[in-house]
């Protein structure tokens, strides 16, 4: 199509009509340039993009659409196009009739006659200014967000580091008060239940004795009473009710043990260390973690093997020490849970997962030593060197803070003058060693 605005072919089925209709209706600007790079074809979309009418642009040089700073090499670019038998793609800044700078995508294709001579150039163009601006703003926003995020992360790490002491103190204080309060509240109804079980058994015995006496004095019972005795299975009740009460008694003892473990685990530390039985702390921690040791869909029960030596009382901050035991044992359970995902139930039954807790005196009898050994996957040496670092964690996002072992080492080494170390062999397991000095 040329700028003479030739009318459409009257035959809608003709190829020429179809092409002309497409050029007129397409949202892409369609421009035809002659060999002098003057506009000789200009569709309505090109008019909307650049603001020039077909008459205004006719025989205007292509440089009219290019900002002044880029006009010097327009001719060289167009000349290169005429020598090219294929199309080219470019992304350019252009200028509209009213002086606005816009960004356009161009596809330029030389028009070649059968003899291989370039007659001109056809261009398809679309204004992508809005898209480019949106992308630019998005990139700038992303950059700002990344910068702010990095700054926030750095600030957060500084805050975590600065508050390391406060975190542990507040955590243990709040947790200790909460658990101690719960244990106290549990003890009241436990005492009531335990104190009334034996009287209840005595009363039940008296009732059965009364029933027997009544039956002895009145052997010919009314048919209604006899039917009820058969319906409720009185003989079974006579045999089962004491067993039921005994089971309740055992359940109460079990709850009492848990309550004692809660109080032992959460015991408040004073400003000075107190004498403490390490085995009590270990037992209470293991009991509180018992629900995590039970089997699930992926593995059987995790075995806990206790090998305790005869240790003297250790002067320590008991509540903080229990928190160390909790961190180490919970990490061991996490490791065995993850390792079980790589095995089968049958294989794990053949080689049970276990945590061995060993206590002993050092040869010079100056240290109380507790070892926590698991038979998990173990750790490589580079990982072993990092696990006590602040905020370092091997757990997925949301499942670990990187504070547990850092706090544990601080409690053992700074608060107690002891040692917390790790030894691990890949494929065999990991051992954490806690050594506490025995002082008068």
Image: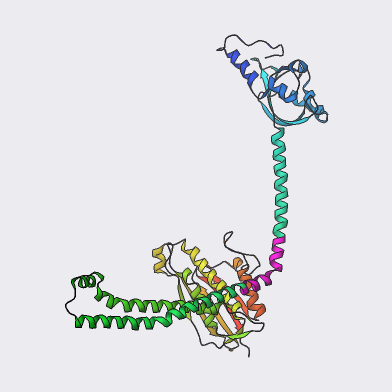
**Could you tell me which residue is drawn at 77 percent across and 17 percent down?**
56
Q: Quadrant of the N terminus?
A: top right
Q: Which residues are magenta?
A: 155-173
Task: Check residue 275 for magenta coloring.
Answer: no
Position in image of residue 335 (x %, y %): 52, 66
On the image, the x and y values in percent for residue 294 come to 44, 69
Q: Is any part of residue 182 visible from this angle? A: yes
- Which residue appears farthest toward the left when viewing the image? 220
Q: Residue at x 43, y 64 (%)?
A: 296
Residue at coordinates 62% horizontally, 19% vertically from top-left? 22
Prevalent SS, magenta region = helix
Q: Residue 15: which quarter of the image?
A: top right
Give above or below for 20 relative to 190. above
Q: In the image, 84: left or right of 312?
A: right
Instruction: Relative to 331, say whether 109 is above or below.
Output: above
Seen in the picture, residue 119 relative to 297 is either above or below; the reply is above
| Scheme of image coloration | rainbow
Q: Position of residue 276 (x, y in %)?
A: 57, 85
Residue at left offset 57%, top offset 12%: 12
Q: Residue furthest bottom?
A: 440
Q: Quadrant of residue 90?
A: top right
């Amino acid at each position: 199509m040329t700028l003479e605005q030739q009318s459409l072919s009257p035959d809608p089925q003709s190829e020429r009509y179809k092409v002309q209709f497409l050029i007129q209706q397409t949202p892409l600007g369609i421009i035809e340039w002659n060999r002098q790079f003057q506009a000789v074809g200009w569709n309505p979309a090109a008019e909307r993009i650049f603001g020039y009418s077909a008459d205004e642009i006719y025989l205007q040089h292509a440089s009219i659409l290019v900002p002044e700073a880029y006009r010097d090499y327009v001719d060289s670019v167009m000349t290169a196009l005429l020598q090219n038998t294929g199309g080219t793609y470019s992304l350019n800044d252009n200028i509209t009739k009213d002086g606005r700078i816009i960004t356009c995508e161009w596809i330029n294709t030389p028009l070649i006659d059968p003899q291989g001579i370039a007659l001109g150039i056809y261009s398809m163009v679309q204004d992508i200014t809005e898209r480019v601006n949106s992308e630019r703003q998005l990139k700038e926003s992303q950059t700002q967000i990344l910068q702010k995020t990095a700054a926030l992360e750095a600030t957060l790490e500084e805050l975590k580091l600065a508050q390391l002491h406060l975190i542990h103190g507040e955590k243990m204080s709040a947790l200790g008060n909460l658990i101690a309060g719960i244990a106290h509240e549990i003890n009241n109804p436990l005492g009531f239940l335990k104190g009334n079980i034996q009287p209840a058994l005595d009363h039940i015995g008296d009732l059965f004795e009364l029933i027997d006496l009544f039956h002895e004095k009145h052997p010919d019972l009314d048919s209604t009473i006899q039917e009820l005795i058969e319906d409720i299975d009185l003989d079974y009740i006579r045999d089962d009710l004491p067993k039921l009460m005994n089971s309740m008694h055992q359940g109460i003892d079990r709850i009492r043990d848990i309550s004692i473990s809660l109080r032992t685990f959460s015991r408040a530390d004073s400003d000075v260390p107190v004498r403490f039985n390490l085995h009590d702390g270990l037992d209470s921690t293991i009991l509180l973690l018992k629900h995590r040791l039970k089997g699930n869909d992926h593995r059987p029960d995790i075995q806990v093997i206790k090998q305790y030596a005869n240790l003297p009382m250790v002067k320590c901050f008991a509540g903080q020490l229990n928190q160390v035991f909790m961190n180490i044992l919970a990490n061991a359970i996490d490791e065995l849970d993850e390792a079980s995902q790589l095995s089968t139930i049958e294989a794990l039954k053949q080689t049970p997962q276990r945590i061995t807790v060993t206590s002993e005196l050092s040869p010079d009898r100056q240290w109380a030593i507790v070892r926590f050994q698991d038979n998990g996957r173990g750790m490589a040496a580079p990982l072993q060197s990092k696990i006590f670092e602040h905020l370092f964690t091997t757990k997925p996002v949301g499942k670990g803070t990187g504070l547990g072992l850092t706090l544990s080492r601080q409690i053992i080494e700074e608060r107690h003058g002891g040692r917390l170390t790790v030894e691990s062999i890949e494929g065999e397991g990991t051992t954490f060693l806690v050594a506490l000095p025995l002082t008068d």
